[in-house]
Amino acid sequence: MRSAALRREHGVRQRKVRQELTLMLSDSKLPHDEHLPWQRVALVIRGGISVNGRSTRQDGSARDSSISPDQDRAERNVTEQVLHSLSATESPRLREIMVAMVEHLHAFAREVRLTEAEWNAAIDFLTRTGHITDAYRQEFILLSDVLGLSMLTVGINEPLSGDATEATVFGPFFASDSPAIELGGDIARGAKGEPCFVQGSVTNTDGEPIVGARIEVWEADEDGSYDVQYDDGRTNGRGHLFSGADGCFAFWGVTPTPYPIPDDGPVGELLTATGRSPMRPAHLHFLVAAGGYRRLVTHIFVRGDEHLTNDAVFGVKDSLIKEFERHLPGDHPPDGRTIEGSWTSTRFDIMLPPSIQPDHK
């Protein structure tokens, strides 16, 4: 029911943004055959664009050679000047990153023949992304998430390691000051939702238990909101605990539900303009750390969720999809707790690989 309502709300928002884009176009000084930046993005995704007589294929390669050799040399000379200015950078790693970034960024601008209007629109987009970001909302992380950069970075830095648990995106709603709970405790702390019992173990890749691993857990309530999204200072739906002598852990929370990422800001406008949904499948966040082992940032997802195949932040991995068994009223939880109404349970066994040292300083 909530997901259907959210989809209807998103459809209304899409129509509103399209209307605003149309008004912007009619009021702007752009030529009428020049598309607004996000409209161009949408057209590229749908199969190519044509701006001022220059066509671009879906793979980004130019279809004509209208740029003169002198113009091409002049443009590339700008890039060479910037690269030369970086030659005195002391840190080899910083120099490597800056050189690559400038080369790719300049190549992008030349490839799409970036207009000044589009450059201004991008600056405005990033400015508004900064303005909406605060201690509780990180719009830049959200932007990284929806562009797939977060998941790509995770994949680069958390390579597959045998049967070790796979990592996924961190997300923008982690808080480092979560309350401590005992094994079997409740992270919900009054958060709305159906009770959910989660149990599992933390082991190394040889199957040996890891004692005292710190397990951070956080989740949204049944309305799809995290505690930090409320303005009353509440702390619920999050906590941390430590694995026991046998490496096992257990806690209560609420059954995860799907929800939209915050789409009332610049990132939401981008999703709307490119015809994408803001929805994330139901999930529960974990951050697991233990001395001598690679830190793990991951989720578990609810099997059967309708959004598993179109996660707005590309975070779903098959190995992280778990069964959440629903129990009827009167069924007794494993810890003997009294539950009024239905509840769910799941198991998540976590395997950590040895820590690896970064190659770059």
Image (spheres, rainbow, N blue to C red):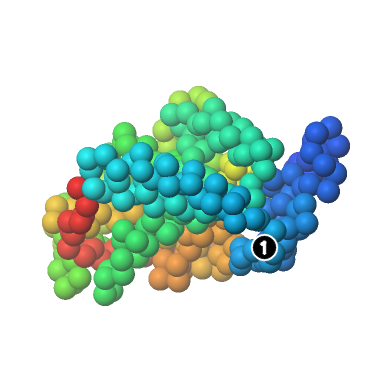
Task: Give the SS element for disc 1.
Answer: loop
Is residue 139 in view from this perspective?
Answer: yes
Foreground of the two, 333 or 283: 283
Residue count near mark 1 (Cα–Cα under 10 Å), binned few <14, some 14–19, many ≥20: few
Q: Residue at x 52, y 31 (%)?
A: 130
Q: Position of residue 266 (x, y in %)?
A: 62, 38
Is residue 341 in view from this perspective?
Answer: no
Foreground of the two, 266 or 314: 266
Q: Residue at x 48, y 47 (%)?
A: 77
Q: Position of residue 79 (x, y in %)?
A: 46, 46
| Residue at the spot of label 1 | 65
Q: Residue at x 21, y 65 (%)?
A: 353
Q: Position of residue 196 (x, y in %)?
A: 44, 54
Q: Is residue 334 left or right of residue 245?
A: right
Residue extending farthest front: 70
The quarter of the picture where the N terminus appears is: bottom right
Q: Amino acid at mark 1?
A: Ser
